[in-house]
Amino acid sequence: MKSKSTSFDIAHMAGVSQSTVSRALNNSPLVNHETREKVKRIAAELNYKVDKSASNLRKQQSSTIALLLFDDPTSDDSSINPFFISMLGSITKASAAAGYDLLVSFQNLGDDWHAEYEDSNKADGLILLGYGSYTDYEYKLSQLEEQNTHFLRWGAPDNKHPGVSIGSDNFQGGYIITQHLLTLGHRTFAFIGDVGDNAPELKARYEGFVKAIEYVGLTPDNIIQVDAISTETAGYEAANILLDSVQPNAIVCASDLMAIGAIRAIRQRGLLIPDDIAVVGYDNIQISEFCTPALTTVQQNTQLAGQILVSNLVKLINNEKVDDILMQPDLVVRKSCGIQD
């Protein structure tokens, strides 16, 4: 039986040292391009594969990224917010492109996730993804920083929380979608979504919504706002609560899932969308295009977000400097708010 080729075989055929072979196969800039390509060609001819386990053991790295997902609690544990599924897909692809495996773990805020990953060599770095208040586990983030754990989080950058933040401008998203409703002539509004400090992303969308209303001289004092987590059921129940007391021109929902629930509540009352009430959402999840009517919403570029999260985490793993990034959202206009003539 033919023995398995080794890096020493490649070194002999290429006329270089074994350490040069190792550097070349890891794309080290210390090896010139011509030598790198020669080593890779010989490795391919010998069907040589790098032993990742041995290589990682030498470098004390796992070549794994851990994605810790914090989702709103629901009665169905198998249910995941479609926005996070889209983010998961983009992060998975970006990790593979960067040469990393991805470990996905669903977490509760009370879990000791801050002590489980990099210290135990399960992962070289962490991505924290989910709605929710990072103030609830600010202590754990501080511990991660003190332990020199490589981590970043999906969320709006601020000065209150440790670590690097990559996120979308939720204030701007709330502003532009409300501004669009105003250009269509809508003047009475309601808002569905939690606006407390425990939901900073949803709160920022509400603040953008209020700013747009104030900009045209309207007062937000009479706006009905109903708290809701990001599920269809919560949106449905919240819409019924507000419709029991008022019928606004437009309902702004802090997520598409809430908006889908609100649409059901409105139609069950025999009201037409957008003729009687316009409805808009946020996130541009895939099903929003196939609602009846199709949902006007705000697009967060999940493909780009996944790439930015992974590339910047890899920089942190390599001890490079990384800054906060705030991505700009886009308005997606469909029929649920009425079409401007």
Image (spheres, helix red, strand yellow):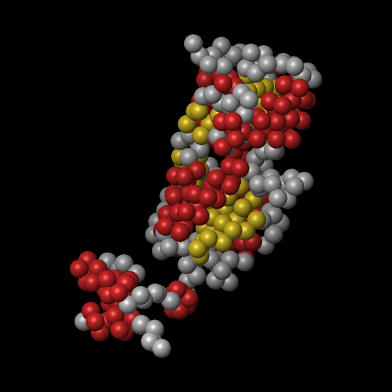
Q: Nearer the viewer, residue 79 or 226?
A: 79
Dividing the picture into quadrants, the one containing residue 226 is top right
Q: Quadrant of the N terminus?
A: bottom left
Total numbered circles: 0
Q: Is residue 168 above or below residue 306?
A: above
- Residue 120 vs 327, above or below: the answer is below
Residue sitting at 51 percent across and 55 percent down? 92
User: In the rendering, at what x and y percent does residue 166 appear?
Assistant: 49, 47
- Camera sees residue 159: no
Q: On the rendered structure, is 208 left or right of 257?
A: left
Q: Give coordinates of residue 311: x percent, y percent.
A: 42, 54
Identify which residue is drawn at 56% across, 37% down. 286
Does residue 3 sit above or below 150 in this rendering? below
Horizontal side of residue 99 vs 273, given as left or right: left
State whether residue 116 appears in this view. Answer: yes
Outermost residue on the front side: it is 1
Q: Residue at x 45, y 73 (%)?
A: 52
In the rendered image of this protein, does residue 204 appear above or below residue 223?
Answer: below
Q: Position of residue 248 (x, y in %)?
A: 68, 16
Taking depth in this image into account, of 11 and 44 the one nearest to the observer is 44
At a point 58% along the width and 50% down the height, the residue shown is 129
Q: Position of residue 250 (x, y in %)?
A: 64, 19
Identify the image quadrant of residue 204: top right
Q: Nearer the viewer, residue 278 or 160?
A: 278
Q: Is residue 320 left or right of residue 268?
A: left
